[in-house]
Amino acid sequence: MVIKIWKSFKKRIFGFLFKKKKDISLGFYGPPNAGKTTLANKICKDWTGEEMGKVSKVPHETRHVQFKEEVEIKYKEKSLKFKLIDTPGIATKIDYEDFMKMKMKKKAAQKRAKEATQGVVESIKWLDDMDAVVIVIDSTQNPYSQVNITIVGNLIAKKIPVLVVANKIDLKKSNLKKIEAAFPEYEVVGISAKKGKNINEFYESLLKLAKKA
Amino acid sequence: MGKRNKKLKGLTLHFMPYSEIAGLNSVERIKKLLKIVLNHKVVVLQGKLRPEEETRLIEDTMIMIGNIKGFKGVELAVIAQDSSSLGFMAKFKFGLAKALTGQQNALTIIGPATIVKEMRKNPKKLEIMMK
């Protein structure tokens, strides 16, 4: 009996002291073509040397959730390990004919549309598993779309910390102030994931966000 | 003669007071709203859905795209009063009213994507672009 109690006590104490710290599950959410995979790729390339997923100008290129585990990000002597989760873009409508306008054959377009609808459902299902979320918004587009507001509303309801990233600031049409005005209660970081512009500021904000997770 | 036979295209706005969905659970609310959208009508709902209901609406819409011929999804917009600019007491009253009656000082507009091309929203206006 005494041995049993001692073993249980030892297990608890040593388990607590040497418990492997869980990686922070960091989700990338946003509408299609905002640059979620481009940003996830940039982070992966910077810290692991490998990319995460394929990018394309045709919307809904990412149609399944993709992961990269044990990504250690360091900034100013601080370091944290993340599990990066790149999700398919969330949309309220998907029409295969839109893909055909981008020179895709009918069958391929229909297949892409079907997979894209399944991808949206998968993205929403994954919301519950996130420790923190980066919402990626195309800064050349209107930020007031209901998809953005719905994602933010859900994250608030689930008490998941959020960082808003205004992507594509290298483009002429980009309007960072409009994004900041649309999300006054959040820190908004303007970046260009493709060109790597302002990426250090992003890493600094990301580590701050992770502390809240 | 030809001109007389030409069909006029119309748009039906279906107004739904909040009381019509207040007693329903989330699944029933979404089912009711999407049923109207499937009948090629634009729903104007007094009030707004809860965030988890909005995502459920998107999920159900995606499932329907794959299963209902000709259905391509919805366009969705919510116009609501911004409470962040209110003073403390006004914010308290606003929160209390919201908790008691649901957010009825909002409007939710849901239209089928086959009819509504785009809903462009900014803090001061909502533009509904038709196909």
Image (cartoon, coloured by chain):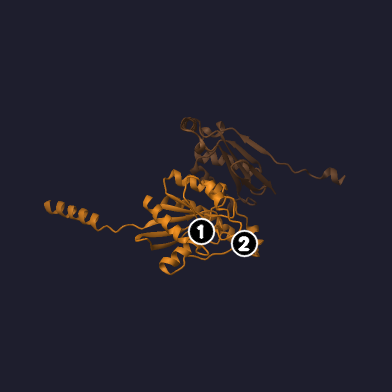
Chain colours: A orange, B brown
Camera-side residue of B106 and A8: B106
> Percent from the top left, x then y, of residue A6?
14, 53
Q: Residues within 10 Å of mark 1 (few under 14, many from 20)?
A: many
Do marks 2 and 1 both belong to one polypeptide chain?
yes
**Quarter residue B109 falls in:** top right
Q: Which residue is mark 1?
A: A191
Camera-side residue of A132 and B50: A132
Looking at the image, residue B113 sits to the left or right of residue A70; the answer is right
Mark 1 element type: loop
At a point 59% along the width and 62% down the height, the residue shown is A58
Residue A166 lies, with reference to residue B11, above or below; the image says below
Q: Amino acid at mark 1?
A: Ile
Mark 2 element type: helix
Furthest-bottom residue in this view:
A49
Q: Which residue is mark 2?
A: A109
Label 2 chain ID? A
Please say if the residues under marks 2 and 1 sit with CB atoms less than 8 Å apart.
Answer: no
